[in-house]
Image: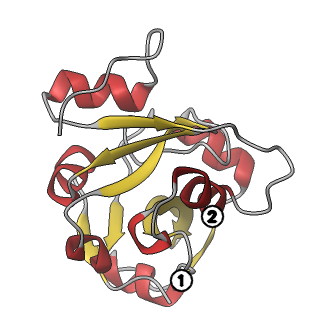
Amino acid sequence: MAKSKQIGQGTPATVALTKAGLPFTTHTYDHDPAAKSYGLEAAEALGLATAQVFKTLLVEVDGKLAVGVVPVDRQLDLKAVAAALNGKKATMADPAAAERSTGYVVGGISPIGQKRNLPTVVDSSATEHDTVYVSGGRRGLDIALTPTDLLTITNAHTAPIAR
């Protein structure tokens, strides 16, 4: 995969990948503010299989923020993500708290380049693909990279957290 040309100054995600020397490509599309699912919109607009496009969800596990990354056509299994992070209970994080913690807006939250390094779990299905797509840090921008590089840049591990 060739490195992409940066859009303006880039996003924190593209800056982090560039700084780490990890290869990636950017893929833009016209975001529809009326879209019900940002992730499904990205997959459709980019002509990608939904199993290859991942959404970034913030959760609270035992009262502490964490990140779950799952395919856009599936849901996050809260019990599974809690267990993957050695916790007892997980709930979806408040959207305002997610935005404050990550520095991104809902619908454009990337697992890469967040303001705070949070414990991160990527659904194990990511390793079935040569390339995965995640938000690039704004609505209408996705980043393609290898699952290994996604795990490296986010300091994540994999677990079956999607249902």
Give the amino acid at mark 1. Answer: Leu
* Dot 1 crowding, Cα within 10 Å, few <14, some 14–19, many 20+: many
In this view, the residue in front, 142 or 56, is: 142
Q: Given the current orientation, which residue lies at the most extreme right position?
A: 34
Name the residue tied to disc 2: 40
Q: Image point 25% across, 52% down: which residue?
A: 150
Is 163 located above or below residue 109 in the figure?
below
In this view, the residue in front, 79 or 135, is: 135
Helix, strand or loop at label 2? It is helix
Q: CA distance from mark 1 to mark 2?
A: 20 Å
Give the x, y percent position of residue 132: 32, 58
Q: Image point 35% across, 60% down: which residue?
A: 120
In this view, the residue in front, 41 or 68, is: 41
Disc tally is 2
Q: Can residue 63 be seen here?
A: no
* Dot 2 crowding, Cα within 10 Å, few <14, some 14–19, many 20+: many
Give the amino acid at mark 2. Answer: Leu
Whether the residues at callouts 1 and 2 have beta carbons within 8 Å, the answer is no
Give the x, y percent position of residue 53: 45, 62
In the image, is 77 to the left or to the right of 12?
A: right
Give the x, y percent position of residue 62: 51, 73
**Residue 78 - label:** 1
